[in-house]
């Protein structure tokens, strides 16, 4: 792949992750966010995102999302 294609793809992945995080945290009063990156057994880059938050009614939400980064 060309450098331009790689840069564009990374930008698209970043915007996709940003939109998902915004939708998951929109109704939370407070939240914590943890991210970790690594590779799987086939050397594909992976991003793990863990969100734990609380809303106005003190309902606790926990969610983990795994995203391949290719």
Image (cartoon, helix red, strand yellow):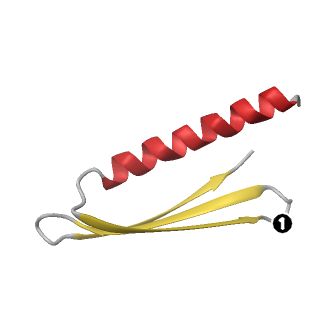
Report whether 39 appears left or right of 27: right
Disc 1: which residue: 41
Q: Is residue 27 above or below residue 1?
A: below
Report whether 8 appears left or right of 65: right
Report whether 42 appears left or right of 30: right
The residue lying furthest to the left in this view is: 57
| Residue 40 figure quarter | bottom right
Q: Nearer the viewer, residue 16 or 61?
A: 16
Q: Residue at x 52, y 46 (%)?
A: 17
Q: Quadrant of the N terminus?
A: top right
Residue 61's x, y, as percent? 30, 68
Q: How many marks?
A: 1
Q: Is residue 64 above or below residue 21?
A: below
SS category of the residue bearing label 1 = loop
Report whether 46 appears left or right of 2: left
Residue 60's x, y, as percent? 25, 72
Residue 7's x, y, as percent? 74, 34
Mark 1 neighbour density, 10 Å: few (under 14) some (14–19) many (20 or more): few
Q: Quadrant of the C terminus?
A: top right
Q: Residue at x 70, y 34 (%)?
A: 9
Residue 8's x, y, as percent? 70, 30
Q: Residue at x 70, y 49 (%)?
A: 69
Q: Nearer the viewer, residue 19 or 66?
A: 19
Q: Is residue 59 above or below residue 13?
A: below
Q: Residue at x 44, y 41 (%)?
A: 19
The residue lying furthest to the right in this view is: 1
């Amino acid at each position: 792949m060309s450098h331009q294609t790689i840069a564009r793809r990374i930008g698209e992945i970043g915007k996709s992750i940003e939109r998902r995080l915004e939708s998951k945290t929109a109704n939370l009063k407070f939240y914590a966010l943890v991210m970790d990156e690594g590779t799987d057994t086939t050397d594909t880059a992976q991003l793990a995102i863990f969100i734990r938050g609380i809303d106005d009614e003190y309902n606790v939400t926990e969610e983990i999302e795994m995203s391949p980064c290719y």
